[in-house]
Structure formats: structure tokens, C-alpha cells
């Protein structure tokens, strides 16, 4: 009997028991191995930063250098075999390109000679006499160093040692002291060749240069509209939602109509002769077709989901009540954006410094070029992975902080006495216990992003070839699959972070528990939650619509300057990015509330022994949703039974 009892106990111990939900009761460090791995990875990044500072020539990067190995604004050491090297350039702080309007890259070298000058020519110089007069009056010599200014007009081959005429007006760039041409055509060619992407970058930079004031104004407009939209969602009502949807419909139809009208105006304009205008017309046709498809899809969804508007307003009001307990949640995107900007600037600085790491070698004509060191290319790839992983880690920290704040406020019994400083409490729990979980979630996104970036690069490479149709199709399909996987992982990570904030479990356990719980309680108000996310998405669309409309009206007055379709597309992307940054807080709070509600139903039954954590307003809202779901199910069952009666034989 004792053996049977022991065997019974052993079998009972072997039966897996369901783990209980314990909101904010138990807390431990999660996924510490991943945190250690991230620390090792960043050790490698710090090594690359130190190596870029030691081996890279930051002086050449910041101050610029000429074709003879002299750093501008510095006293230089001579390079053996280069007679014009080792000069004192303390008074010559500006970098001047002798052929700035016709730069070419030959064998990874610029064809133009680069000099250090004391000042940039701010007016156009058409003859060598004007170049000589500029040198005598300003003390800035634009010809090769071994040619005296007196001989600019005397020596027959002086035109080979002086800049190509006419010399465009230029100004010094504020930080890097480069003489940048001020005419749009020269500027776009100059900048695009320096970054080794002549075709596409030429169109982008020329359009931005020709309408830089317009682009800046549209970016400010997008920022202001995003703030206005955030406050609209903060104090949302049923009337505001109806006005908001009406504006969305009008905005979509108006932008779509304006695009088709502009395309019709271009096709009937007999004075179109420039290639830029023809390219604008082609881009307008693409914009018009894309906007028509998007408008049709969104209008169909609005019509199908129109009956859920009232419930969605109530859900957003419940969300706003959760935000009102910690209103500083709305400012979370600002500090996240500031940290991201700081990291991106640091990343670009290290990347450029790695690009300057090289040994000096003398080439023909006594000029000096710098050959990159071995192993730099592998450091670039490591550096790229660091960019994606760290950026996703910063964004995941924001999601975890917002979810932790919602969890702290939701699982508080005394609703009249909200917890003190819930955001700081959530951040302290994140940094003390759950950084490893955030690292693991961001790493999964990185694993998906890198193959997607490689496939996009392969697709763009094959796009230029004529015989790679099958390869382009396969790579595009793979990109779409990775995009879908990326979106699913983002949603999975958000639920896993919220579950970790509730239960204090690791990433995999949290993701598994969240999927089980959400699938079990998906019948309550999943449709209303999805429509709430859809309304928030429409807010982003509204910001983009008004920004694009302003861009269309502004750019249309400068048709003949440059191709403005690509700058308009960039402005639209920036508008969506800004709107998403501000409105994503509402999405995160909404998803976190849904998961907290599911946990509340799982752990409590509403009795006096186990009362719900949700307040009375939220509870009434859930009861109304359940009544509507029951009514809809009854109607569906009645229709099914009626159809079955008609089919039965009499």
C-alpha cells in the first residue's frame, strides 16, 4: 500500500499543473543570458568605436582634406613622394572642389582636384580674370598651390590647373567646411557623386534643394497635425469621431481627385518639354493609381465597420481614462525619439570614421589617396546589425514602459488613489528585472529585418537587369513573407512584454501564456479592439492626407525646377512616421488593457472574495459588449435554423 501510495504521489507530481497568473506578485530577473549576450555584442560595438577613433582620421572627416594629403585648417606632416603635401593650412579651413558641377568617380576616386582655401566664392566666376581678382581681394587661391595668382592669366595651360569655368557660387557647410554649390543642378550632382549614387540620389537631392523651404514647412505641418491628432484622441467623443471620419473621407477623395486633376493638367499641357516635367507626370500617374486603390479599400472598411463607432468611442474613452492616471505617457515618444536621434548620430559618425580608416598612398600627379584597411567591411556589417538591434531595443523599452504603466494602474484595487509615479516605477522594474526579455524580443525582430534588407538589396540589383524576372519575383515574394512575419512578431512582442510586466516571467513563457489567454477570450471585444486600432490608423492617414495635399499645392507652382515627386513621397513618409510615433501610445495602451482585462477574467470571478480589478465603467462596457455578442449569435443561430427548416422535406 505504501508503494502504491508512493507511485500515486510520483504520478501526481509528474502531471503538469497549469501555472497561475499572479499579477505583480512575483518578480525576478528574466532572460539574463540574453542580457549578457547583448552586453558582449555592445562590447564589440565599443571596440569598433575605439578602433574607428584610433585608425580613422576624424580630422580628415570633420575638417576635410585636399588631393595632396593635407588636412584643411591644420599644420600637416609631409607624405613621402607627394611634393605638395605637408603644408601649413591653418588659415585655409574650407574644402574647395575645382570641378564641383561635373564630379565623376573613376576607380573609386574623384576626378576633380580638391584644394584647401581660405574662403568660398559666393558669386559666380566666369573667367580666369575674375578668379585672379577673387584671389587678390580675398586671399583665397582657387588654383593648384604651385601656381602663383599672377600667372593665372599668363600661363597657357593655366586652365588645367584652375577650376573649370564657370565657377558656381558656393557657401561653406556649417559643420564640415565644404564649399557647397548653391545652384540646384550643381548641388544635386555634387552631393550624389560624393555618396556614389548618381541616379536616384541626384533626383532626391535636386528636388529637396529646389524646394527645401517647402519640405521644411511640410515637416513642421506634419508635426503640428500629429500633435493635434494626439489631443483629439485624448478628448474623443462620438461627435468628434463622426467629424474625424468625415474629414478622412473628404481628405482621401480630395487628394485622389487632385492627383488625377494634376495628371490631366500635365497631359494636356503642350508646353512640357523638360525631362523633369515628364518624370513628374509619370510619378503623378503612379501616385494617382496608388491613392485610388488605398481610398477604395479604406472607404470599404469604413462602411463595413460603421456600426461599431459608438462602442469604439467608449473603448477609446476607457483608454483615455487609463492614460489620465499617468498623463506623461503621451510624452514617451519624445524621449524615445531623442534617444534614437542621439544613437543614430553616433552610429553615422562611427560609420563615417570607419570609412576614413586607411593608409596614405601616392598616386599619379603627386596626389595622395587613402586605401581602406583590411577587415573594415566586416566591421561595417557588424555595425549595421548593431544599428537594427539597438534601435529595436530602444523602441521595445518604450513598449515595455508603457505596458508596465498600464499594468500598474489597472491592477490597483483603490481606483480613487492611483499609484505614485507609475512611469518611474515601470522603468525601474524594466531596468532592474526585464532588460533581458526586451533584448530577446528585439533580437527576433533583428533576425527578420536583416534577411529582408538583404532581399531588398538583391531585388534592387536584379531590377536593373533585363533577364532576372523570375529572380525578382521570388525575392519580392520573400520580402512580402518577411514583412508579414515582422508584423506578427511585433504584435507577439507587445503581448509578451505586457505579460512579463504582469507576471514577471521570461519572454517565451510570456508569449505562450499571452497567446493562450487571448485565444481563450477573443470573443469578448476583439472586433471592437481591432476597430479601435483601425480608427487610430485613420488618424495617421489623415495627417498624411493633409500633408500631401499641402505638398501638392506648394510643389505644383515649381514644376520646371526639379523632380518633386520623390521629395513629396519622402515628406509623406515622414508625416506617417511622426504620426505613428505620437499615436502608437494609444495602440500600446489599448492592447495592454485588452490583455489585462483577459487576465482579470482568468483570475477573478467578480465575487466578494475575488472582485475584478476593472472599474465600474470598464465593467459596464464589457457587459454591453457581451450583450451585443449574444444578440448577434442568436440572430446567426436563428438564420441558420430558418435555412435548415426550408431545406427539410415536408
Image: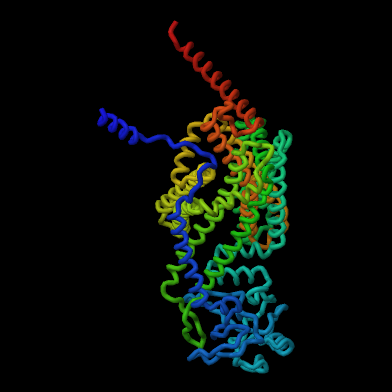
Residue 513: x, y in percent? Answer: 46, 39
Q: Nearer the viewer, residue 307 or 140?
A: 307
For residue 235, which quarter of the picture?
top right
- Residue under the image location 47 percent in, 14 percent down: 644
Q: How is the image coloured?
A: rainbow
The foreground one among 374 and 367 is 374
Number of disc labels: 0
Residue 604 is left or right of residue 547, and the answer is left
Can residue 264 be seen here? The reply is no
Image quarter (top left, top right, bottom left or bottom right) of the C terminus: top left
Q: Which of the 4 image quadrants contains residue 536? A: top right
273 horizontally vs 80: left or right = right
Q: Quadrant of the N terminus?
A: top left
Q: Residue at x 67, y 92 (%)?
A: 149
Q: Residue at x 41, y 55 (%)?
A: 468
The residue that appears at 64% across and 28% down in the rendered structure is 620
Q: Is residue 1 visible?
A: yes
Q: Position of residue 492 (x, y in %)?
A: 49, 44
Viewer-closest of 370 and 420: 420
Residue with the most extreme front position: 2
Query: Where residue 127 sits: x, y (%)?
Result: 69, 84
Look at the picture and state if 161 lies above or below 294.
Answer: below
**Rendered position, 515 above or below 477:** above
x then y, percent, for residue 165: 65, 81
Q: Residue furthest top?
A: 650
Amino acid at each position: 500500500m505504501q508503494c502504491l501510495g508512493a507511485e500515486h504521489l510520483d504520478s501526481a507530481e509528474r502531471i503538469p499543473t497549469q501555472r497561475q497568473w499572479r499579477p505583480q506578485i512575483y518578480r525576478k530577473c528574466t532572460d539574463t543570458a540574453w542580457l549578457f549576450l547583448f552586453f558582449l555584442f555592445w562590447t564589440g560595438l565599443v571596440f569598433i568605436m575605439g578602433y574607428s577613433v584610433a585608425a580613422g582620421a576624424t580630422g580628415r572627416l570633420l575638417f576635410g582634406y585636399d588631393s595632396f594629403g593635407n588636412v584643411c585648417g591644420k599644420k600637416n606632416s609631409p607624405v613621402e613622394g607627394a611634393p605638395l603635401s605637408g603644408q601649413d593650412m591653418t588659415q585655409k579651413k574650407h574644402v574647395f572642389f575645382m570641378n564641383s558641377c561635373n564630379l565623376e568617380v573613376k576607380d573609386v576616386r574623384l576626378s576633380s582636384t580638391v584644394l584647401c582655401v581660405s574662403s568660398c566664392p559666393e558669386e559666380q566666376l566666369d573667367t580666369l580674370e575674375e578668379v585672379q581678382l577673387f584671389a587678390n581681394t580675398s586671399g583665397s587661391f582657387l588654383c593648384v598651390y604651385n601656381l602663383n595668382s599672377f600667372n593665372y592669366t599668363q600661363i597657357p595651360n593655366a586652365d588645367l590647373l584652375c577650376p573649370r569655368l564657370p565657377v558656381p557660387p558656393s557657401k561653406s557647410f556649417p559643420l564640415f567646411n565644404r564649399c557647397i554649390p548653391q545652384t540646384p543642378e550643381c548641388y544635386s550632382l555634387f552631393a550624389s557623386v560624393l555618396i556614389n549614387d548618381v541616379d536616384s540620389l541626384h533626383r532626391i537631392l535636386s528636388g529637396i534643394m529646389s524646394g527645401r523651404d517647402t519640405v521644411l514647412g511640410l515637416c513642421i505641418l506634419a508635426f503640428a497635425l500629429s500633435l493635434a491628432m494626439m489631443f483629439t484622441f485624448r478628448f474623443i467623443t462620438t461627435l468628434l469621431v463622426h467629424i474625424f471620419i468625415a474629414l478622412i473621407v473628404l481628405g482621401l477623395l480630395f487628394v485622389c481627385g487632385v492627383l488625377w486633376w494634376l495628371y490631366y493638367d500635365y497631359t494636356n499641357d503642350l508646353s512640357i518639354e523638360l525631362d523633369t516635367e515628364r518624370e513628374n507626370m509619370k510619378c503623378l500617374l503612379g501616385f494617382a493609381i496608388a491613392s485610388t486603390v488605398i481610398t477604395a479599400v479604406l472607404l470599404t472598411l469604413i462602411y463595413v465597420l460603421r456600426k461599431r463607432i459608438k462602442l469604439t468611442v467608449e473603448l477609446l474613452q476607457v483608454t483615455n481614462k487609463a492614460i489620465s492616471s499617468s498623463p506623461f505617457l503621451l510624452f514617451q515618444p519624445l524621449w524615445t525619439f531623442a534617444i534614437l536621434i542621439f544613437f543614430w548620430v553616433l552610429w553615422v559618425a562611427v560609420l563615417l570614421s570607419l570609412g576614413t580608416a586607411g593608409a596614405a598612398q601616392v598616386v599619379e600627379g603627386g596626389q595622395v589617396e587613402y586605401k581602406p584597411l583590411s577587415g573594415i567591411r566586416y566591421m561595417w556589417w557588424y555595425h549595421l546589425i548593431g544599428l537594427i538591434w539597438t534601435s529595436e531595443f530602444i523602441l521595445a523599452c518604450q513598449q515595455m514602459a508603457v505596458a508596465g504603466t498600464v499594468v500598474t494602474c489597472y491592477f490597483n484595487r483603490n481606483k480613487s488613489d492611483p499609484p505614485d509615479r507609475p512611469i518611474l516605477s515601470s522603468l525601474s522594474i524594466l531596468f532592474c528585472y526585464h532588460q533581458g526579455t526586451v533584448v530577446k524580443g528585439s533580437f527576433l525582430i533583428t533576425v527578420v529585418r536583416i534577411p529582408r534588407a538583404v532581399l531588398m538589396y538583391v531585388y534592387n540589383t536584379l531590377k536593373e537587369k533585363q533577364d532576372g524576372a523570375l529572380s525578382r519575383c521570388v525575392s519580392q515574394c520573400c520580402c512580402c513573407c518577411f514583412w508579414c512575419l515582422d508584423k506578427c512578431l511585433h504584435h507577439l512582442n507587445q503581448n509578451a512584454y505586457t505579460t512579463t510586466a504582469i507576471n514577471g516571467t521570461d519572454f517565451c513563457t510570456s508569449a505562450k501564456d499571452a497567446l493562450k489567454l487571448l485565444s481563450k477570450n477573443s470573443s469578448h471585444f476583439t472586433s471592437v479592439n481591432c476597430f479601435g486600432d483601425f480608427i487610430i490608423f485613420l488618424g495617421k492617414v489623415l495627417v498624411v492626407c493633409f500633408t500631401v495635399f499641402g505638398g501638392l499645392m506648394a510643389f505644383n507652382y515649381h514644376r520646371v525646377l526639379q523632380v518633386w515627386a520623390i521629395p513629396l513621397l519622402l515628406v509623406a513618409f515622414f508625416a506617417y512616421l511622426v504620426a505613428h510615433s505620437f499615436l502608437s501610445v494609444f495602440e500600446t495602451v489599448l492592447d495592454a488593457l485588452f490583455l489585462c482585462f483577459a487576465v482579470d477574467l482568468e483570475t477573478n470571478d467578480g465575487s466578494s472574495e475575488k472582485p475584478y480589478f476593472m472599474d465600474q465603467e470598464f465593467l459596464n462596457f464589457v457587459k454591453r459588449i457581451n450583450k451585443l455578442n449574444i444578440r448577434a449569435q442568436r440572430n446567426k443561430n436563428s438564420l441558420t435554423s430558418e435555412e435548415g427548416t426550408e431545406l427539410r422535406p415536408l
